[in-house]
Amino acid sequence: MKQVEDSEILAMFAVEHTRNEAFNLLLKKYQQKIYWHIRRLVLNHDDCDDLLQEVFVKVWKNLDKFRSDSQLYTWIYRIATNESITFLNKQKQRNNTPLDEVSSELADNLVASSYFNGDKLELKLQKAILTLPEKQRIVFNMKYFDDMKYEEISEVLGTSVGALKASFHIAAKKIEAFITNDEVDY
C-alpha cells in the first residue's frame, strides 16, 4: 500500500468531512514510531500507552494550527518527547527521588516487564542507556533507534546540530564503557 504524504493528510484534515479519515491515516503512519520513541524513554508499556494516547489527543486538538515550518513527524516527535519528559519529571517529583534512582527504578521495571523480550545484551544496552543524563539519552535514542538525522533531532529538541553530535558521541562512549565493563551485572 502506498504511503500517504503528510501534505495529503493535512489537506484532508482541513476539510471537516475527511478529518477523521485524515487522522486515521496519520495514526497508521506514525503511531508505531511514536510508541517506540516514548517506550524507549519511559520503558513501561502501560505508561507508554497512556502517553501515546495523550500525544495523539494533543495532535488532534492542534493539527489545524500546524504551520508546516517543520516536518509533521518532527512536530509529533517534539510533542511526544515533551510529554515523556514531563511524565518522567512528575514521576521524579512524586517519588521525591533523584533522576539516577528513577533510572534504576525504570531498569528494574524493564527486567520485570512481561513486554520486554530482549536478550541479556539488549538488557545491558538498555541499562547503559538509563545511566545517561536525560538529554543524552533522548539524543541517543533518536539517533540510534529512530535513525533520525541531526537536523531533524535539532528541530525536535531545539538544540544546535553541533551540540547534538557532541551529546551523541559522549553518550555512545559512555554506553560502550558500560557494556565493556565486565564487573557490571546484567
Image: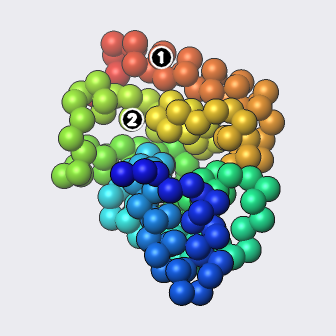
- Residue 176 circle label: 1
Residue 57 x %, y %: 53, 76
Mark 2: amino acid? Gln
Question: What colour-coding does the image apply?
Answer: rainbow
> What residue is drawn where x is 49% and y is 23%?
175
Q: Nearer the viewer, residue 141 or 65?
A: 65
Q: Residue 9 carries which label?
A: none
Q: Where is residue 17 in the image (x, y as percent from the top left)?
A: 54, 87
Q: Is mark 1 on a helix, strand or loop?
A: helix
Query: Which part of the image, by quadrant, shows the C terminus?
Result: top left
Q: What residue type is labelled 1?
A: Glu
User: Which dot marks residue 126?
Assistant: 2
Please tell me whether residue 15 is drawn above or below residue 163 in the rendered image.
below
Could you tell which of marks 1 and 2 lies nearer the N-terminus? 2
- Distance from disc 1 to disc 2, alpha carbons, whole Å, reads 12 Å
Few, some or many residues within 10 Å of mark 2 (<14, 14–19, 20+)? some
Crowding near the residue tagged with mark 1, few <14, some 14–19, many ≥20 C-alpha atoms within 10 Å: few
